[in-house]
């Protein structure tokens, strides 16, 4: 029984994964990884800088093997590749024109920092990734692209309509 007197039900493994994915997205939006939270500020400050991920030449063509996409009604139309370190959203991917008011502030801040850093730039009437960008969380990548809170394991899909969850969580 919880402290508030409510009886908590056990969730399914999928429910727990979804909840963990949401927490990962919120932590990633703050520029941290969950495994880094246990470190002291001194350890974090002395940690090596993240390395830039270079896509192998074979994965560059549009519609390539392992590519996933996400689309939304407000202009989102993005392509990405799953990497060991996270999800690599590809240059030229379109981002939603705006964000919904209910989008968590941490995710709005993460999106705005990509605009400020010129990773996402204005392209005509919309917004596009000006370069490839690696997100440590598939859900943060989905939320930034869609302009709303999103579960990336369910929203990123391959050419056959299979979700990242179906492809990478067996």
Image: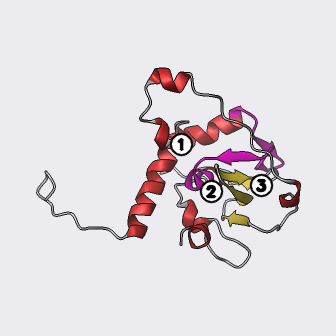
SS of the residue at dot 1? helix
Whether residue 104 is visible to the viewer of this picture, yes or no, is no
- Is residue 7 left or right of 107 when viewed as pictured? left
- Is residue 161 left or right of 79 when viewed as pictured? left
> Which callout, 1 or 2, points to the residue nearer the camera?
1
Tell me if residue 118 comes above or below residue 44 in the rendering.
Answer: below
Specify the segment rendered in magenta. 116-143
- Is residue 137 left or right of 130 when viewed as pictured? left
Crowding at dot 3, Cα within 10 Å, few <14 / some 14-19 / many 20+, comes out as many
> Which callout, 1 or 3, points to the residue nearer the camera?
1
Which callout, 1 or 2, points at the residue further toward the start of the chain? 1
Quadrant of residue 110 within the rendered picture: top right
- Is residue 20 part of the magenta span, yes or no? no
Q: Which residue in the structure is indicated by mark 3?
A: 93
Tell me if residue 95 comes above or below residue 169 in the rendering.
Answer: above
Q: Which residue in the structure is indicated by mark 1?
A: 28
Crowding at dot 1, Cα within 10 Å, few <14 / some 14-19 / many 20+, comes out as many
């Amino acid at each position: 029984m919880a402290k508030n007197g409510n009886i908590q039900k056990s969730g399914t493994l999928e429910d727990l994964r979804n909840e963990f994915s949401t927490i990962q997205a919120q932590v990633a939006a703050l520029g941290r990884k969950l495994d880094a939270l246990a470190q002291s500020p001194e350890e974090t400050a002395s940690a090596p800088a993240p390395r830039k991920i270079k896509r192998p030449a074979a994965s560059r063509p549009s519609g390539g093997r392992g590519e996933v996409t996400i689309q939304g009604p407000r202009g989102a139309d993005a392509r990405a590749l799953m990497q060991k370190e996270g999800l690599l959203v590809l240059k030229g991917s379109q981002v939603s024109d705006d964000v919904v008011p209910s989008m968590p502030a941490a995710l709005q801040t993460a999106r705005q920092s990509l605009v400020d850093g010129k990773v996402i730039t204005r392209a005509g009437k919309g917004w596009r990734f000006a370069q490839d960008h690696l997100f440590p969380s598939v859900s943060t990548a989905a939320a930034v692209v869609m302009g709303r809170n999103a579960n990336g394991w369910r929203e990123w899909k391959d050419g056959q309509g299979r979700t990242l969850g179906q492809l990478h969580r067996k």
